[in-house]
Image (tube, rainbow, N blue to C red):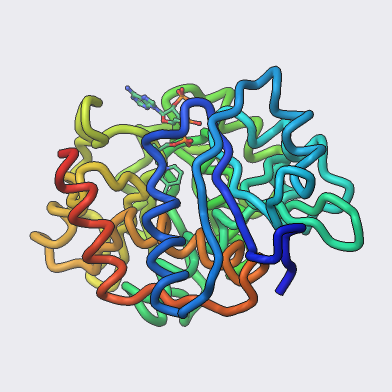
């Protein structure tokens, strides 16, 4: 375990704003349940101050940090060492210091896969097609994750076709852009459908797609986690499909950073999930 100049390992989440972050709840739960004398704090840092703050992370007494909006791309640019996922996504959400160098990873892919593996075991037991709705920042992480799991076709549907085209061209085959007119046909051959748009999120319009064409073995994943059960997750359950809500990704993406900073691999337990669900439900 790395230790801060003060001895007790301290980590933080850096954002602007950051007060809404649920990372302290998650990391403090793990610190307590693993009996580690460390701390996890909120660091509200403006974009103008971010490079200086990160440049002096150790001097501020931190062994590492999570990075959230709007700093993920700047964090990437500032890192001396980048893990492959960060390199591929050009965004960093987890920082640590190693041999005096600022290192960065992007754990959104691992978080997405961890959630699917936990909530829909063996979802990738055979090669197949994934339908991805959306082409924003999170879609990039999810496409990368699906490539890691060797999906044979990854079909992108997005309101702005040019955003999807950029994403597809950055990754190349087997990522393709498809028009909404072909969504039903695409769904008929899909093992997995993932919503990465903000539709269905509290305050946003619902995502209204008919899940009827999906085969019975298909898994539906919605990375939106406020509300805990989105209309899409509800519709998937009603159809008898396995459904993976967004809270799992939120919890699993936190684990790699915790292990780096505090030296123990944490687990996404039912108790942790219940705690975070209660916090989200209070906001719904
Ligand atoms: P971005 O802003 O980068 O992307 C938003 C996407 O949603 C774009 O594809 C955009 O399409 C689409 N979209 C937005 N509004 C509409 C609309 N009215 N109709 C159709 N499409 C629309 O957001 P992120 O990718 O960062 O996040 C997306 C969602 O995922 C958020 O709800 C976020 O909370 C959630 N999320 C969950 C995580 C988790 O851990 N579970 C992690 C990260 C994000 P267009 O390209 O046309 O603008």
**Near-viewer residue (118 or 61):** 61
The residue under the point 69% across, 33% down is: 73
**Would you place residue 53 above or below residue 38 in this image?**
above
The residue under the point 44% across, 51% down is: 23
**Near-viewer residue (42 or 175):** 42
Image quadrant of ligand 1? Answer: top left
The residue under the point 46% across, 79% down is: 35
Where in the figure is residue 185, as x and y percent of width and height? 34, 49
Instruction: Tell me if I can see residue 20 in this picture.
Output: yes
Judged left or right of residue 276, residue 23 is right
**Near-viewer residue (274 or 185):** 274
Where in the figure is residue 30, as x and y percent of width and height? 43, 70
Judged left or right of residue 79, residue 146 is left
**Would you place residue 266 above or below residue 194 in this image?**
below
Instruction: Tell me if I can see residue 84 in this picture.
Output: no
Query: Which quadrant holds the C terminus?
Result: top left
């Amino acid at each position: 375990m790395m230790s801060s100049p003060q001895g007790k390992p301290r980590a933080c989440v850096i954002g602007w704003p950051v007060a809404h972050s649920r990372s302290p709840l998650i990391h403090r739960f793990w610190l307590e349940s693993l009996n580690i004398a460390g701390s996890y704090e909120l660091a509200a840092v403006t974009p103008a101050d971010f490079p200086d703050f990160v440049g002096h992370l150790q001097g501020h007494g931190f062994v590492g940090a999570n990075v959230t909006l709007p700093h993920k791309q700047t964090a990437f640019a500032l890192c001396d060492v980048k893990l492959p996922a960060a390199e591929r996504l050009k965004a960093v959400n987890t920082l640590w210091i190693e041999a005096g160098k600022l290192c960065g990873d992007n754990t959104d892919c691992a978080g997405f896969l961890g959630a699917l593996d936990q909530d829909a075991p063996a979802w990738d037991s055979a090669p197949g097609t994934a339908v991805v709705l959306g082409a924003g920042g999170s879609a990039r992480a999810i496409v990368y994750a699906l490539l890691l799991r060797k999906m044979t076709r990854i079909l992108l549907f997005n309101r702005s076709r040019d955003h999807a085209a950029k994403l597809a061209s950055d990754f190349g085959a087997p990522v393709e852009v498809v028009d909404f007119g072909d969504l039903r046909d695409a769904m008929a051959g899909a093992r997995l459908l993932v919503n990465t748009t903000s539709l269905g999120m509290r305050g946003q319009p619902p995502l209204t797609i008919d899940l009827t064409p999906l085969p019975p073995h298909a898994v539906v994943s919605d990375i939106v986690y406020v509300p805990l059960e989105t209309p899409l997750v509800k519709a998937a359950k009603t159809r008898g499909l396995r459904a993976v809500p967004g809270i799992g990704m939120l919890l699993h993406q936190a684990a790699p950073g915790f292990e780096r900073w505090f030296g123990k691999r944490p687990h996404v337990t039912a108790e942790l999930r219940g705690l975070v669900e209660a916090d989200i439900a209070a906001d719904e």
